[in-house]
Amino acid sequence: MRTVVKRTLLWIAAIALVGAGAALFWKPRAPATSNVKDAPAPKAQSIVVNALDRVLESPKLVQMMSKQAAKMLGAKSGFLPLKWDGLNGESAGFVAVGMPERALTALRAAGLTASCSLAEIAQKKIRVDRFTIARLQVAFSKETAGALQNDLSQEPQLFDPSEKDGEFRLDIRETDIQSVDLLFGNPRAGGSFRGVTVDLWPDGPNLVASGYGGSFALSGLPKMEIREFKVHYAKPDLRLDAATMLVGLRGAIDVKGDVVFTQPGKMDIKLQFSKCDLKDFLTGAFRSKLSGAFDGDANVKEQFGSEEQTSVEGSVKCTGTELHDIDALRKLADFTGESAFRRLHLQVISGKYRWQAAALEVSDFVAESRGLLRLQGSFTLKAGNIHGRLQLGVSARVLKSFPGAREEVFTRSHDGYFWTAISPAGPMKDAGSELKQRLVAAAERHFAKLLLAPILKPGHAILERLRVLF
């Protein structure tokens, strides 16, 4: 369970990377000022544009822009040669290689175009009405940097960050990225966003981004389809207003929350799960032994870099759940004569949970197969151990197979079941040992009371089967 929670945390944090990664080419513009001088007349502007064509395509300008981009990204950067048609410019590509202690490891962009205006050149501002990137690939780890595809005809020269600010400021009004690929993590717990379409536009000094399409994948979790998302970025705060992902045939996950990119950063994310298939979120042998769907919610709070400061709490409710092909249930079916245990239908599984400091606390837990048994209470799982206070109720027709249990173990009756308290304390594999000991002891005393017990030793076979039941 702990591994699943960690993977889920990685996935939640990764949602924010869509907005953060798409914003790599964006720089906030200052609030509008009054008394702006009139734009140059069209004829004068045309003369300026023609005179600048040769300058704009010069290697010196490419070098200057590369150094400014490197400063903004904290990475060695380089543009391929620029081409201009009036005020419409383009570059076949851009590459950046991250520096030590930076989150960004590598970045590749192909098909860059910009529609510019010199209306505010007097204020040393170049306005970009529309900036388009055909494909943006970003890696946030050394392990994933090698997976970025080389889709450029040639590699640009990379430059170190500029030591001074540029003479002109870019005012980018709208950015369209037709396909964004973000790769992060490592082979053991890595993931990616692929083929996401992103639109970005300024909101005063801040940034709004929305997107749709593409997919999200993370090791240990099912591949998900991105329906839509919208984020608002006011450095250093990223607000996730809405995000919806589709998983499996019917499942959906809605996400909202905040991420703060400070040192150390933190996040507060809320998730809502709807009609998600249990199998999509299970790994290992148990994936083939449990079926059903679940609804639920989760509130994730994390102080980046500190697992002790990470917490997840929420609730879950499963529907149509079935346990099957489990050895203990087969033995229980044979022992009681109740074939329903072979494929145990659980009409109810629900509970609240809290995960922090590698411990999972579950409260208000209920699991019921109507007419057979019901388990309810609370427990804590940590480092392979369980500590709990639970109540187990079984039906009369199940209880009759356990000699002496009605008189000594399941002594209370209400709500259609006979009940006993269970307080597991120790390794998970021994969670049922205390109950088994009590059932065996009750059966031994039951058979000892029989008239012919000293001669026939009745119940010997039943006692042996009880000892290996679970």
Image: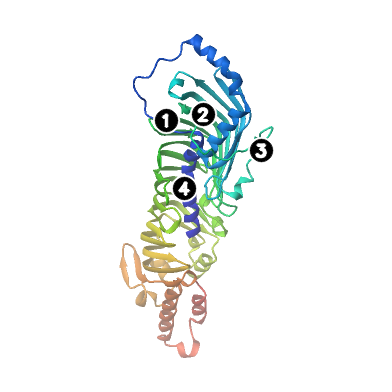
Measure the alpha-carbon separation of dots 2 and 3.
21 Å
Q: Say which element carries label 4.
A: helix
For disc 1, the marked residue is 29
CA gap, disc 4 and disc 1: 27 Å
User: Residue at label 4?
Assistant: 13
Work out whether residue 317 or residue 371 is closer to the camera in this orientation and state it. 317
CA distance for labels 3 and 4: 27 Å
Who comes first in sequence, dot 2 or dot 1?
A: 1
User: Callout 2, which amino acid?
Assistant: Asp
For marks 3 and 4 on the same chain, the one whose residue lies earlier in the sequence? 4
Q: Residues within 10 Å of mark 1 (few under 14, many from 20)?
A: some
Precedes in sequence: disc 4 or disc 1: 4
Label 4 crowd (10 A; few <14 / some 14-19 / many >=20): some
Identify the secondary structure beneath mark 2: strand
Which residue is tagged 3?
150
Q: Amino acid at mark 4?
A: Ala
Q: Residue 255 location, x and y as percent?
A: 42, 43
Disc 2 crowd, CA 10 A, few/some/many (<14, 14-19, 20+)? many
Q: CA distance from mark 4 to mark 2?
A: 23 Å
Mark 3 → mark 1, Cα distance in angstroms: 32 Å
Inspect this view and state whether residue 25 appears. Answer: yes
Residue type, numbered disc 1: Arg
Q: Residues within 10 Å of mark 3 (few under 14, many from 20)?
A: few
Q: As displayed, is residue 76 above or below residue 153?
A: below
Tell me the residue that label 2 is attached to.
Answer: 176
Q: What separation in Å lies between label 2 and label 1 (alpha carbons)? A: 17 Å
Residue 352, x across and y down, in percent: 36, 56
Nearer the observer, 282 or 225 = 225
